[in-house]
Amino acid sequence: MNINKYIRIILFIILVIVAINRLANINKQHTDPDAQAVAQRVFDPTVEQALEHIQQEGATGSALNDLNRAMQTRINSAAPPPIASLELQPKQDESTGKWGYVDRENKWIIPPQFDRADDFYAPHNVAVVQKGRRWGYIDTNGAWILPTDKASELTAQESGDQLGYVNTQGEWVIPPVFKYIYDFDPQTSLAFVYACLDSQCDQSGWAFIDITGTLTSPLFDRDPHFDEDGMAIVQLAENGKEGVINIRGEWIIPATFDSIEPFLMIMG
């Protein structure tokens, strides 16, 4: 028999054996979860797997191709980005005087409802707003952000010449919009702050706030000095009338007097 014919027969047998082995491996991948995981990594690696491959085997051509394919997969499968905060600008409604946010086409995205509205911070997509007696952060949908529900997690923090409160991760929970502040009382979950109710600070004074940054008391002319019984004489910033409150800001003696002497508190 011709030698070339023998060689062709041997090559044919080798090709048949290789084909059989490949079919066996494919069947195993369909039935073996571990094999499927390996195949998934080879043919559709994640970015993390591709980087691990490079770290283990070096920046080979196949490893770099895996990384490129993984990055492209992640880009293609990424969800559409949210409204870019830089596209939202604060705007005052002339008819109501309230503030909201518009897009680049001057279309209302967040309806005018706030008494104060600052620019959005691009890295975090949040903005400082004031609504009535409440200060806080909103997201690009206009929803209030409440990162914590525990007064013990809030710590006074300074930013420039303003003060606010951060959580245990150092994130702002109550924006730095106050001139002076006290720590939150863990017993009452309230803090005493010096607040302004308008941009010119014509309406200003001391008041209690809760952990959402909402004022829970009227404005007082001075910060209260509580006695051992937890009571303090306060003077309303609005009309100068004096009364007595407890540590929760509740009235013990209504603010209807021109002046209250400390001995009246003992009688009360």
Image: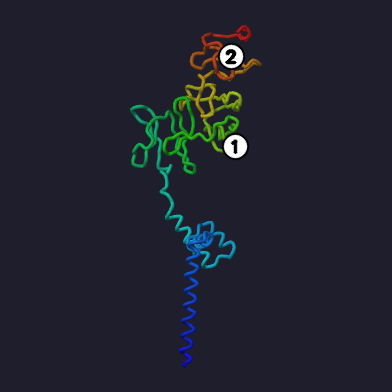
Q: Closest to the observer: 162 or 103?
A: 103
Residue identified by numbered label 2 = 233
Taking the spot 57% from the left edge, 15% from the top edge, the residue there is 245
Task: Name the element at disc 1.
Answer: loop
Question: x%, y% of residue 97?
Answer: 37, 27
Query: Mark number for residue 29?
Result: none
Mark 1 or mark 2, which is nearer the start of the sequence? 1
Residue identified by numbered label 1 = 168
Q: Closest to the observer: 233 or 47?
A: 47
Q: Is residue 90 above or below residue 30?
A: above
Q: Is residue 30 above or below residue 176?
A: below
Q: Amino acid at mark 1?
A: Thr
Q: Closest to the observer: 217 or 23?
A: 23
Taking the spot 52% from the left edge, 25% from the top edge, the residue there is 195
Looking at the rendered image, the disc whose residue lies closer to the viewer, 2 or 1, is: 1
Q: CA distance from mark 2 to mark 1?
A: 34 Å
Q: Closest to the observer: 131 or 69?
A: 69
Q: Amino acid at mark 2?
A: Ile
Question: x%, y% of residue 251?
Answer: 54, 14
